[in-house]
Amino acid sequence: MINWLKYKRIYFVVSGTLAVLSIFALVVWGLKPGIDFTGGTLVEVDSKEAIAVFEENNINIQAVQETGERVLIKTDFIDQEQAQLVRSQIASVAATIERFETVGPTLGKELLNKTLTAAIIAVLGILLYIAWAFKNLRYGLAAVVALLHDTLILAGIFAVLGKYMAVEVDALFVTALLTTMSFSVHDTVVVFNRIRENKEDQRSMDVTDIANNALTETMVRSINNSLTIMFMLLAMILLGGETIRWFMVALLAGTILGTYSSPFMAVPVLIQLLKRKQA
Amino acid sequence: MQRRSFSIWLIFIITLLSLAIALPDRYNLKFSRWGLDIDQVIGSPEININLGKVSIHKDFRTSLGLDLAGGSHLVFEAALDEIDAKDRERALEGARNIIERRVNYFGISEAQVQTSKSQDSSRIIVELPGVEDVDNAVALIGKTAQLKFREAPEGTPEAEATLPASLYGPYTIDSGISGINLDRAEVQFDQQSGEPVVGITFDEEGADLFAKATKRNINRQLAIFLDDQIVSAPVVNEAIAGGKAQISGGFSVDAAKQLTTQLNAGALPVGIKLIQQRNIGPTLGQVAIDRSILAGAVGLLMVAFFMIGFYGQMGMIAVVALVIYGLISFAVFKAIPVTLTLSGIAGFMLSIGMAVDANILIFERMREEMRSGLPWQQAMEVGFGRAWDSIRDANVATLLTTFVLFNPLDWQFLPRFGLIRGFALTLAIGVIIGLFTGVFVTRSLMRAFYRSKK
């Protein structure tokens, strides 16, 4: 048995620092919303000449990004008449349009609101399910603390990426965020199950020792499981398409966070909660 | 013992079935070796069953989303506030049906037209896989196509058939004939000028109204309006019975075809406006598919190496279970069918990771029980039993999240975003199949084939 919980202060300091930095990044820089949220137009073409077309039509270009042979142009929202005009003009400068998306501004706001609702419902559902499965609200609370910790830091990472690498968050990022939540819980549940099982087997033992045992027993599984997921995600990041690269990065960061938070966040919190009950 | 060999057979049959369904849609198998010449197209089977009156037809095709196959995703907003509250539901549904009829003009088999409601707006979502001429599609779908015949009061001087100053200009009288009275429209060519025109045939009531209107207006103009824009205002020479008329407005052949389609499909009961479009070119999608397949293969190989390296013989069995898992999942995707999108593929990849997790949990548990002195047969059974609790709870938590993301009950306060839905659906299917292969398949295979040296 390794005395994992002896260092719980260190875990709390590490997590606390990361959380504070994330809040700082989110408040100061914020996330860089993509057209899914703000509304706008996104065009992917194979020639830079297309940029001039937008300039000639007095369409405000927000960003231009070059990816190999292609150019990604992001502008304000344009209506169908303008879109039609722009498309025919781009075609006349012999550029192939690979992608052309416009999102109306109201649609973006709606997505944001609904996503938040979805996230809150998912968190509540998870809290209730775990509280019910373990017949103890404390398990649910500890799992949700770890989950919020992961989500917060993941958002913080993307605030930093947005600031320094102009990475935008889109609907896929939201998916990654929600997946991180469910993965985080997935991982936490396994450790919690072990704690519960050990508690039943060794009633006389101190909770901290029980938790230390459970952590030792599940650590290999936890790391191995994360490794297999990380293999898949790394392959997708390195070999998969441009479009989903940042989505995969978000999932990878989420996986690492979820793996870290189960033993080093959820369990220490749970033990604190369980001890308070005893005192 | 008999039950065990039964499980193996069951797994074998399921795997074979899945393999048959998961085969590429059409694949030309062609090689010459060992003196054999093989040239045959293999593909997933089609089911054609005829039992008296009941006939079942099912073919299994991979259905790819717009981001992979290329195509257009269009979202229109319906201006329902122009309509009485009680008629809104019907107007929206009517508009959807008419748009569907118009879309059929493109001859796309997998085009989809759906309505979607959100707090204060109603939308019609049109998915057109493979369509490249978006502008044409938007023009065809988005026009209301309200046809009207209007008359000018007696004594009005003949006017040019251009846009009138006020809405209907001199044509202040509604003749009572509209698109509703249409039986059908078709593209014709004017016999004198040879230019394309739209020939229309009225239904009985329309023919009657038209005969009366032409009789009233001999030597005067009868103006044809489309969506309150004048198309033409021909002078009536004589009363026309028989219910046939011609709309000529300097159309190109394409424009005439488009108008014909719109008139045949009927006018939209409500105006619609395009608020979102996503158009993906076909090459971009192909690149994405190729890359995802490559990435998936490399990722799977890494997982396989890792599992075999870490768990040896047990790992081998897990990899076999994983292959079976992949086959069943893909077969299910084709059978439902699930439209595969990039985010859907991502969901599937993640579910692979979770499927492997079930095996890792079980193997770790087994090793533990063996360390505590149990012989491997017992350790195996105990390991499966004890790991099950964790596997179940963890997977239920994941399924809970996918449920919220997929929003199967169409709750308005939750997102119904295709991208997110695709992800949630494949992840959920993957998790469920992963439970089956990770626990049942692995256990049966272990019982049948695993022999520990210890």
Image (spheres, coloured by chain):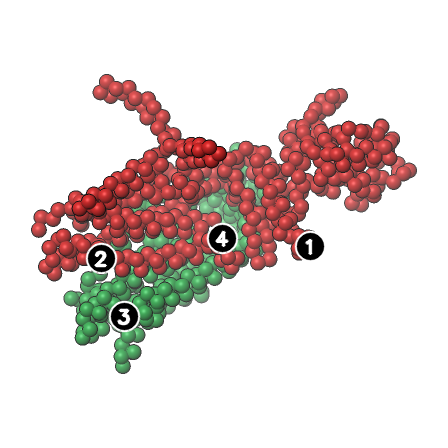
Chain colours: A green, B red
Q: Quadrant of residue B151?
A: top right
Looking at the picture, do discs 2 and 3 lie on one chain? no
State the residue position of label 2: B385
Q: Chain of mark 1?
A: B
Res A214 visible: yes
Measured Cα–Cα span from mark 1 to mark 2: 61 Å
Residue at position x 33%, y 35% from top?
B20
Tag 2: amino acid: Gly
| SS assignment at label 1 | loop
Looking at the picture, do discs 3 and 4 lie on one chain? no
Which marked residue is nearer to the observer: mark 4 or mark 1? 1
Q: Label 1 crowding class (10 Å Cα cut-off): few <14, some 14-19, many 20+?
A: few
Measured Cα–Cα span from mark 2 to mark 3: 27 Å
Tag 3: amino acid: Pro
User: Which of marks 2 and 4 precedes in the sequence?
Assistant: 2
Position of residue B200 measured from the top left corner of the image (x, y, whole percent): 72, 31
Asked if the residue under mark 1 is in contact with the one under mark 3, i.e. CB atoms within 8 Å, the reply is: no
Residue at position x 30%, y 62% from top?
A189
State the residue position of label 3: A268
